[in-house]
Image (tube, rainbow, N blue to C red):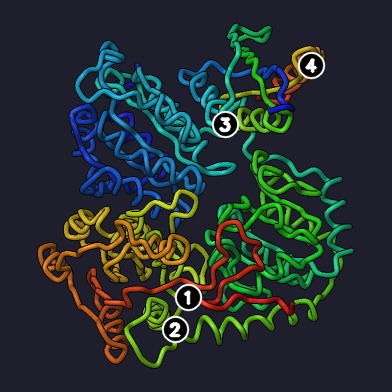
């Protein structure tokens, strides 16, 4: 497909066994190959950060992110083109976590 | 130090504290501790013993759909768990709240190919709303609480708890607190008020507005909010198959069912409206016809609780994320009183065509063999529209959907998105278990009933008084219909030899009557409905029956086959 580009899908989640496999299934179900995958603790305590690099188009990338966010244990997910920087990601997750804390 | 209980007993206590009084299940080696503890809670927790785990989950789905209470399933590991997989996928796509507890081998045996071990977390994760493996007894109560919260809130769905032997056998104290918050999970998004205002402007400006609603209306208890919205806006509405019964069939603004085998009027209105308001539905390909031609003249508003649905299939001008009842109420408060009588009247003109070309020959035939549609019609008439109608999948489902009439919500239970043959019989058992005071009638074909026929044993044991209407045509009728229309009448593997259902019914102690002719149909249906026990009415219907009207795959919603020879032409 001519319109395919390299995208980064960035996911912040609670640590839940089995989540990685069901997230990667969201890609495979749509016939999207995962070019690379990293998993590491995020800057937020207890929150994991996954990044997927995938070749796909913009519509698929945005849909995949919505389906990933639908997973109960996912806090937030983002997509952007590989050569872009997403500077607002940290602030968005930070605001989400602050807004979702029981006082 | 408080008293300690086994994890197995903690599960039972947590279920009871969650308000569960009925579970559907089947014992086995890896769940035997739970069944052992269940023994002493018999007076507080009713267990319905099914004959196959698939029956348990479909029964739980029927239970949930009829009552709005979550269905609960308890099965063993390995094959017990894999046997519920079809129902998990079905409950996911049809948004049905079900909590499934699967036994699992002990913690140290995980991953060793132990006896009856299967990777339940890996298998169910992609097809359910949430999966969790419980490995410690102290996690039982909190995970049960979380499971019910997730299954029943937002867009409901199935949740799987994979319960290892160690967690069942180990000891922990009991404290149950219902869950009402998960940091990463926002079940009901707050409506965006600027989007509400924009929607109100669009609705006030519309000349030919039309609502298509789905099961979301039922799930959010938005039936009254929808009625108020339609009345104030003077807006006609069509239902998807899963939305059926959310509005009473005689509601003045109700135009019928949309989709492949829907009514003419709502399908034509979809194509001709200038504003389409979709409420709690997901633009299934069975609803839209060819997507690129769907409602092309209309601006579109989509109200849904699930963000992934908005824009997934049909691009919309405005997405309104939120709970259907809340969003509809906000819209109704803000929009103008209006009426669009001419629009509705003009669309109703096609009712006459549908009645003459489709309904009359199907429902009021004067001669020839018994028809599926007339059988459904007589059952519905006999039950006064009061019954919960359950269907299997195929022609029985389409006829049940087309010719049932409803007075109450939650009265039509079918497998929509997944289209699971074999769903009907156990789902009817579940519906009757949930609502014993209501009549429950199942329409099922001779193909589908044989997929879960063993559940007649559950009826035998539980005395579940379901009324089974077998639309028996000796074919896999819906596939046969497609073969007749689109595959040159090559009836590949759709001819089906049937057992003698009178002997089957007798073996299970279920009352039985066969009906072959129009003359005896009414009386036979009366006998079935008057029965206080389960009843199998074996209706020998026309072998080569067809479901019309039909928008074939790849056609526009207004390209409609009325019968073998005629297509509806919309004033062209």
How far apart are the two marked residues, 1 and 2, measured between alpha carbons?
A: 8 Å
Q: Are marks 2 and 4 on the same chain?
A: no
Are the two marked residues, 1 and 2, in contact with CB atoms closer than 8 angstroms? yes
Q: Are marks 1 and 3 on the same chain?
A: no
Using the image, determine if residue B526 lies above or below residue A71.
below
The quarter holding residue B34 reads: top left
Quarter containing the N terminus of chain B: top left
Residue that badge 1 annotates: B403
Image side of residue B195 versus residue B49, left or right: right
Residue found at x 57% / y 31%: A30
Q: Secondary structure at mark 1?
A: helix
- Image mark for residue A91: 4
Residue found at x 72% / y 65%: B271
- Image mark for residue A30: 3
Using the image, determine if residue B117 lies above or below residue B285.
above
**Which percent across, then down, holds residue B15?**
37, 38
Are the two marked residues, 4 and 1, in contact with CB atoms closer than 8 angstroms? no
**Which percent across, then down, holds residue B515?**
24, 81
- Image mark for residue B363: 2
The quarter holding residue B513 reads: bottom left
Closer to the chain start, of discs 1 and 2, is 2
Which one is in front in this view, the residue at disc 4 or the one at disc 1?
1
Q: Residues within 10 Å of mark 4 (few under 14, many from 20)?
A: few
How far apart are the two marked residues, 3 and 4, measured between alpha carbons?
A: 30 Å
**Which percent across, then down, holds residue B217?**
61, 57
Query: In terms of depth relative to the viewer, which is nearer, A22 or B564?
Result: B564
Are the two marked residues, 2 and 4, in contact with CB atoms closer than 8 angstroms? no
How far apart are the two marked residues, 1 and 3, measured between alpha carbons?
A: 37 Å
**Chain identifier of the residue bearing label 4 in the image:** A
Closer to the chain start, of discs 3 and 4, is 3
């Amino acid at each position: 497909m001519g319109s395919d580009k390299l995208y980064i899908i960035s996911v912040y989640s609670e640590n839940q066994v089995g989540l990685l496999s069901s997230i990667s299934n969201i890609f495979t179900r749509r016939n999207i190959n995962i070019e690379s995958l990293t998993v590491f603790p995020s800057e937020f305590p207890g929150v994991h950060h996954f990044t997927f690099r995938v070749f796909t188009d913009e519509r698929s990338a945005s849909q995949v992110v919505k389906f990933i966010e639908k997973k109960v244990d996912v806090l937030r997910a983002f997509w952007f083109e590989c050569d872009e920087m997403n500077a607002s990601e940290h602030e968005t997750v930070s605001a989400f976590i602050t807004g979702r804390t029981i006082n | 130090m408080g008293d300690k209980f086994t994890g197995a007993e903690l599960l039972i206590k947590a279920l009871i504290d969650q308000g569960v009084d009925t579970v559907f299940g089947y014992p086995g080696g890896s769940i035997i501790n739970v069944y052992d503890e269940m023994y002493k809670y018999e007076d507080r927790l009713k267990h319905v013993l099914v004959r196959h785990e698939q029956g348990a989950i479909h029964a739980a789905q029927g239970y949930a759909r009829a009552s709005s209470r979550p269905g609960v399933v308890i099965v063993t590991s390995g094959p017990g768990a894999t046997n519920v997989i079809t129902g998990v996928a079905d409950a996911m796509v049809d948004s049905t709240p079900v909590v499934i507890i699967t036994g699992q081998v002990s913690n140290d045996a995980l991953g060793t190919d132990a006896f009856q071990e299967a990777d339940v977390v890996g298998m169910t994760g992609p097809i359910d709303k949430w999966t969790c493996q419980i490995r410690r007894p102290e996690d039982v109560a909190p995970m049960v609480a979380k499971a019910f919260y997730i299954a029943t809130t937002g867009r409901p769905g199935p949740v799987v708890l994979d319960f290892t032997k160690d967690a069942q056998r180990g000891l922990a104290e009991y404290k149950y607190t219902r869950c009402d918050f998960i940091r990463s999970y926002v079940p009901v998004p707050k409506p965006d008020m600027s989007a509400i205002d924009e929607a109100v402007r669009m609705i006030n400006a519309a000349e030919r507005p039309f609502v298509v609603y789905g099961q979301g209306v039922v799930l959010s208890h938005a039936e009254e909010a929808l009625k108020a919205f339609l009345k104030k806006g003077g807006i006609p509405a069509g239902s998807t198959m899963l939305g059926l019964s959310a509005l009473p069939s005689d509601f003045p603004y109700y135009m019928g069912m949309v989709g492949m085998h829907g009514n003419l009027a709502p399908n034509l209105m979809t194509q001709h409206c200038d504003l389409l308001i979709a409420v709690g539905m997901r633009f299934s390909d069975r609803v839209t016809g060819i997507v690129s031609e769907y409602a092309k003249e209309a601006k579109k508003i989509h109200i849904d609780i699930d963000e992934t649905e908005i824009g997934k299939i049909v691009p919309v001008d405005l997405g309104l994320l939120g709970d259907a009842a809340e969003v509809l109420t906000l819209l109704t408060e803000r929009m103008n009183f209006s009426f669009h009588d001419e629009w509705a009247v003009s669309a109703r003109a096609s009712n006459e065509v549908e009645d003459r070309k489709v309904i009359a020959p199907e429902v009021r035939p004067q001669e020839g063999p018994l028809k599926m549609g007339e059988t459904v019609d007589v059952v519905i008439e006999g039950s006064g529209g009061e019954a919960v109608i359950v269907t299997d999948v195929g022609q029985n489902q389409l006829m049940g959907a087309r010719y049932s009439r409803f007075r109450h919500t939650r009265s039509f239970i079918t497998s929509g998105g997944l289209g699971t043959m074999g769903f009907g019989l156990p789902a009817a058992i579940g519906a009757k278990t949930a609502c014993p005071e209501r009549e429950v009638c199942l329409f099922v074909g001779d193909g589908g009933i044989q997929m879960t026929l063993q559940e007649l044993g559950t009826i035998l044991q539980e005395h579940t008084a379901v009324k089974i209407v077998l639309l028996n045509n000796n074919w896999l009728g819906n596939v046969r219909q497609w073969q007749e229309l689109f595959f040159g009448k090559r009836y590949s593997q759709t001819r089906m030899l049937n057992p003698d259902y009178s002997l089957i019914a007798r073996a299970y102690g279920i009352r039985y009557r066969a009906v072959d002719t129009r003359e005896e149909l009414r009386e036979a249906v009366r006998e079935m409905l008057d029965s206080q026990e389960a009843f199998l009415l074996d209706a020998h219907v026309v072998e080569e029956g067809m479901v019309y009207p039909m928008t074939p795959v790849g056609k526009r919603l207004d390209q409609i086959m009325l019968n073998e020879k005629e297509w509806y032409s919309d004033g062209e």
